[in-house]
Every structure is written in structure tokens, then in C-alpha cells.
Amino acid sequence: MEESLRDKAAITGIGETVYSKVTDRSALSLTLEACLKAINDAGLVPDDIDGLIPYPSQGLTAESLITNFGLKNVRYSALTPMGGASPVAALQSAAMAISSGVAQHVLICLARGHTESNDGKITARLAEMPQMNTVGEFEMPLGANAPAQFYAPMARRHMELFGTTSAQFAEIAITCRKNAILNDKAIMRKPMSLEDHQASRMISDPLRLYDCCLESKGAAAVVISSKERASDLKHSPISIIGAAEGHPDSPSAITQRDNFVSLGLAKAAPIAFKMADVTPADIDVAQIYDCFTYIVLCQLEDMGFCRKGEGGEFVMSGAIGRDGKIPINTHGGLLSEAHIAGMNHINELVRQLRRTCGERQIKDASVGLVTGYGDLGDGSIAILSR
Amino acid sequence: MIYPSVSIESKAYWTGLTNGELLLQECTDCGTIRHYPRPMCDNCYSFGHRWIKASGDALVYAWTECHHAFHPSFAELTPYTLVTATLKEGPRLMAPLAQPPKRDLYLGMKLKIEFNQVSSDLTLPIFKAT
């Protein structure tokens, strides 16, 4: 059971569009570009793809991919509707489809394309998601209308219980920014100081503007292949050695959750580590879903990089910097590269393990992990090895 | 104003608020009290329930002070504080803190539920520091 998906599948291709604040291109158009790049990067042609896991947003479907690429051989399609946890959860689903023999090359993609305006629309957009029904009915009428407002109480309780500070949250934003400065693709590349962070306006206390990720446009995709097929392709395969998803108790209402300072990842991480037969000490680089700084801190604790309540001190120790014990978000993350719902985190981890990151390359990176976080606490994790 | 899309399972809850009562579901088989309203008891899987009136006593569990309005109907209310509090009956409730906002909240602080009629057909719970 614990070894079920170890080394059965590998990431063989990655692809991304330009990332920007606005775009005049549709989500589908961006998706097709990213997918084509990922397929080419793998050394495949579109018709080699026989499995599809699109991110269900802005009308993107398996059918639209089949139509546009003229795919003839798709025999597996699935969705992993877990918000920002979806792309990494899709790695697990792809590995399952491949290890069972149903598919050989699975394409996973995600896009954020042109929208007329975001003003006031987030509440309506969230309320339409079935997994947001409870929050939509009972909390949105009270004035809890967006993720910052849903998650801020968790951050506040962590601060009250453990003495965590806003300056400790800032360290995460500053670390991501330092990495983004070395990444041409990143949208935010101006240096950020603690003073800049503390002077940024309050959004939903304790979360300031610089604790919140960007809103971005663009697309990213990856191709997952069976280990046998992967060895014949263009790049050395980056093997999936551990993968899991986890759902917090009371997944549809944070307010009713027994453990307010732990996320679904706390359930998934031990499974993935056991499957991969590694411990946090073996991880060379981690791309951690960073919709908000606090969510990174909580995930570091939930994965066991430090004990619960010690995340603040841990990030201040220098552990998450490029020379630290566990360098995080080497591309700048959602906080500074772009918000491509974590598909950009998977792309970056593959680049780190291929050792093609140039100036921001983590020396000798061999084993890395990527996490996803979404909706109201769903978590996903994949551990990859070169 | 954001109006809730009331379901057949939650209708009694919203009607209760209109009448100045916070109603919670109590399982008629095992006595577990649950919130938010839903069809089945997650302790014993019974579909039987009755509605009980909450005492209105609650203790602060977490909070956030909202400075940015993500929806236009709350723009004029900022900053407003949303409190998550543990009801005496067990479940938690999120509700805004009555104005003027109290700044020195702490975990375990005592609150009392009151009712805020925001329109002719919508009443929301609010918390008041005791």
C-alpha cells in the first residue's frame, strides 16, 4: 500500500506561457500553448497523449483539448477539483492511471485567461463552486467573501496560540521575492524589505497585502509518462516517488474544524513521505503552495519540517532561503512569480531537479517536493526525484 | 447585500434568525448538536433531528478584522470584525462583531449572540462583548 505509486510514473515534459497581470487571450488559447510546449518538451507529439486532467476553470474541459489537438487516443480523463491543490493532486491521479496501465502519457494543464474584470466578482465566482456551498450560504452574507477572509482567522489563532508574528509571515514573502528577482518570468521583481511588508495595507488582519499572492494570467502544463516510456524521451525523467492528497476534517467549513491550525496536508504528507521512503531531512528543495504567507508556515509544520507552533522561528532561522536547510519557492511562488494555481510550482520543481535553473539553481538538487493547497484546506503533495 | 440561497435543510435556521432565535440541529438518536445545517448526523448517521434554541453564550475562538471589502455591499462597513466563536452548545458560529468594534479581543473572551435585521427578509447573527 505505502509503496503503491513509488517510481511508477515520471514527469517528462513541462510547459508555460508568459505570465502577466492581464491578458487578452482566452484560458483555452493559453492552455493550448502551454500544453504544446509540454508535449514538445517531452519529445512527444499530441497524439501520444492518452490521458487528460484539465483544471476545471473558465470552461476548460477534456473535450476542448481533444477538439483543438485532434486527439484520437484519449482513454482516460479526470478532474481533481480541489482549488489550488488540484494540480499536485492530479499528479497522484495521473500516476494511478499510468501504474494501472490505463494510460501511458497523461497531460495536466491549468490556465487563468482573460476576464472582463475581477472587481467584486470573486465572491460570485466562489459561490458558484459546489465545494463552496456551505460558506456561500452561511458565511458570505456575513461579510466573509474571499480566501483572505476565510483564512485570516486561522492565522490569527496560530498567532494567539504560539506567538507567531507578522514579521515572521513577512520573511516568507521576502524569501519568495528574493528568488523572483533571479527569475525572468516573475511578475514581481522589486526587492521587498520587512518595512515594505509592514507598510503594505491591511487586507484582512493579520494578512497584509504582501501576505497575499498575486492575481495573474497565464497557463502551465506537464506531461506524466510511465517509467518505461519515460526513459526513451528527451529529458531524464523526473520520477514521482511519493504522492498523496488530504482533506481536512470539516472540509466545507473552516469554522467547524477541530484543528484550526492544521491543514489537509497534515494527513497527506506522512503518506507521501512513507511512499517515497524519505523524510523531510532528505528534501533538497520544496515548492510550497503560497496563496498566503501563513499557509506556507502552516504547511512547513504540517509536513514536519518543524514542530507545530514553531513555524515562525523556523522561517526566521534562514531555513527557507536558497542556502538554507529547505529552500522554498525558488521561482518566487504565487507571491512573486505568478498565480498559476501551483502548476508553476510543479514546473519549477522539475527544472530544479533537471538542474536547469541557472542563477537560482539549488546545488545538487536531487529530491524535491511540491505541495498544493486549495478551497478551504484541501492539501496535496508530490515528492519527485531525478 | 448578499442573500443566502436557502435550502430545504436550512430553511428553519434562517426563519429562526428572523424570529430572533439561533436554531441548531440536535440528533434525535444520539443527541449530537451540529452546525451548519445538514441532513445527517456525522456521529451516528441518523437522519432524525430536532431544532433547539441556542443559549446565545459563546467564547471567542478566532477572528479577523476586515479592511478590504471583496464585495461592494461591505465597502461602507470596513473595517469590520468577523469573529468565530464556540457556542455553549458545542458548534462554532461566525458572525460580525457589533459596532463599534472592540479592539482587544482574546481567545476565550465571552460573547453574547444578538440579531441584526439587515433587510425586511434577512436577519443575521451578530456578537456582542458581554
Image (spheres, coloured by chain):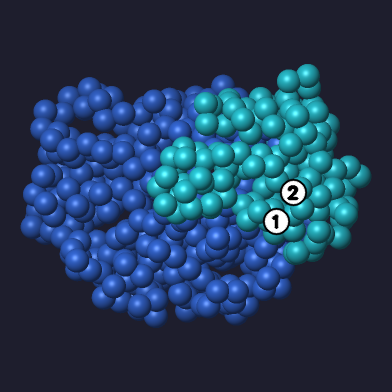
Front residue (pair A252, A325): A252
Left or right: B84 in relation to B102: left
Q: What amino acid is labelled 2 in the image?
A: Ser
Residue A45 at least partly seen: no
Assign a secondary structure to mark 1. loop
* Chain A painted colour: blue
Which of the image's four quarters has the C terminus of chain A?
bottom left
Residue A112 lies, in percent from the top left, at 46, 34
**From mark 1 to mark 2, how far is it between C-alphas?**
7 Å
Q: What amino acid is labelled 1 in the image?
A: Lys
Left or right: A307 in relation to B86: left
Q: Do the residues labelled 1 and 2 touch (CB within 8 Å)?
A: yes
* Chain B painted colour: cyan
The image quarter containing residue B121 is top right
Residue B10 lies, in percent from the top left, at 57, 32
Residue that carries the numbered disc 1 in the rendered image: B88
Residue that carries the numbered disc 2 in the rendered image: B55
